[in-house]
Image (tube, grey):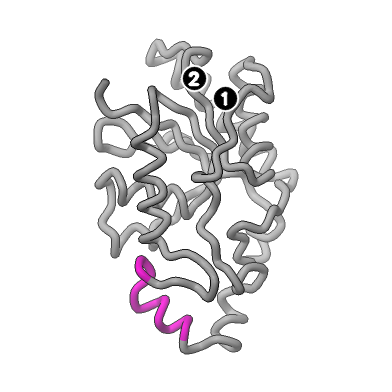
Amino acid sequence: MGMPTVYYIRHGETDWNVAGRLQGHRDIPLNDNGRDQARHCGLVLRDLFAKDGVDSAALDYASSPLSRATETMELVRDGLNLPRGDFRRDDQLKELSFGDWEGSTIALLHQNDPVRIAQREHDKFHFVPPNGESYEMVSARMKRWYAGLEGDTVVTAHGGTCRGLMVALGVAKPAVAPLIDIVQGVVYVFRGGELTRYA
């Protein structure tokens, strides 16, 4: 088997996204706009599969276990006319952990933890938040996850894990990946060492 194709969807918007709070492993639900974004991704996938002659029922489906990702997957599967709950929940797809910083905003951290925020801005890929994870660690986790795939897979997960996958698959350089905006309501297709966006 060659390199499996990954249809990657960042979870829809949450109220913490709107407030600029670092979510990490905190289990924050989708808001109504986030649900609309998830439904939109289901329709984008439906049209993409129809155009490419892909049988949606033959693919693997995997989600981060956090509710913002699992609800996104349920709504995506609605758009594909597939049973809502028939997908894997995989801990390897959890968001990058921000550790003690979760729930805070970057603006607050500039006030409360300026030295470490400066270190993070100097080297985002290798920086480890207090009791958290670096992008380097998440990229290694996503490399292991990708190596375990048995075929083309639809994924609902997070911005951090998407950036980690970009580095793991050589789509983006380590210094650049943490700066890339992973947009909600968009399907990212990793195929043959390239990345294409569909909205």
Residue 3 image point, x, y percent:
28, 29
Q: In the rendered view, would you say 180 is above or below 144?
A: below
Q: Which residue is mark 2?
A: 47
Residue 57 or residue 137, whichever sits in front: 137
Magenta-span inclusion, residue 63: no
Q: In the rendered view, would you say 165 is above or below 151?
A: below
In the image, which residues are magenta? 116-126
CB within 8 Å, label 1 to label 2: yes
Magenta-span inclusion, residue 121: yes
Q: Residue at x 34, y 74 (%)?
A: 123
Mark 1 belongs to which amino acid?
A: Leu
Residue 22 image point, x, y percent:
60, 65
Q: Residue at x 51, y 58 (%)?
A: 96
Relative side of 193 to 66, left or right: left
Q: Which residue is mark 1?
A: 43
* Residue neighbourhood size for the residue with mark 1, other residues' Cα within 10 Å, grouped as few (<14), some (14–19), many (≥20): some
Residue 180 image point, x, y percent:
39, 57
